[in-house]
Amino acid sequence: DPGADLAVCAALISCLGGRPIPLDVTFLGEISLTGELTPVANVSTRMSEVKKFGINKIITSITPSDLQGIKFEHTKHISLLNEVINKF
């Protein structure tokens, strides 16, 4: 699933850097070969499933208009992989 690209990358960064990812954070995004993050399909369905698990922080590349009807305490918007690394 391309939507898991960012999550896998975050896990690798966490492991190699010795910095744990908080339990209430999830990652959603596809990473291009140049390191840019792109939106994924079925965003509404994915966000609904995330909320069911009690996760309230999402790190993703989508814009606020893509989150219509879904409320989150914290949503971070990123466009490049380097910004993800600096969020930990």
Image: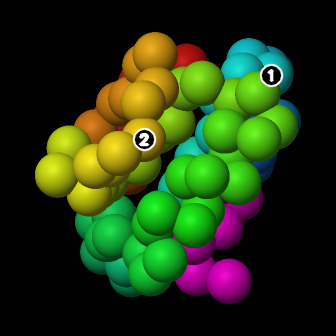
Residue beneath label 2, please?
A: 70
Q: Nearer the viewer, residue 84 or 42?
A: 42
Q: CA distance from mark 2 to mark 1?
A: 20 Å
Residue drawn at x 43%, y 19% is: 74
Q: Position of residue 15 (x, y in %)?
A: 82, 36
**Image quarter for residue 23?**
top right
Q: Nearer the viewer, residue 28 or 16?
A: 28
Residue 2 lies in the magenta-colored region = yes
- SS for tag 1? loop
Residue drawn at x 44%, y 81% is: 41
Assess whether mark 1 and mark 2 are in contact (beta carbons under 8 angstroms): no
- In the rendered view, tell whether residue 67 sits above or below residue 14: below
Q: Amino acid at mark 1?
A: Leu
Q: Is residue 66 visible?
A: yes
Magenta-tinted stretch: 1-8
Task: Give the left or right position of residue 73, taking residue 24 as reference.
Answer: left
Residue drawn at x 60%, y 24% is: 56
Residue 34 lies in the magenta-colored region = no
Residue drawn at x 70%, y 29% is: 55
Dot 1, how many residues are within 10 Å of its Cα: few (below 14), some (14-19), or many (20+)?
Answer: few
- SS for tag 2? loop
**Image quarter for residue 13?**
top right
Residue beneath label 1, please?
A: 23
Q: Nearer the viewer, residue 73 or 30?
A: 73
Q: Amino acid at mark 2?
A: Ile
Colour scheme of the rendered structure: rainbow
Q: Quadrant of the C terminus?
A: top right
Q: Is residue 80 visible?
A: no
Q: Main secondary structure of the magenta part?
A: helix
Q: Residue furthest front?
A: 69
| 2 or 1: mark nearer the eye | 2
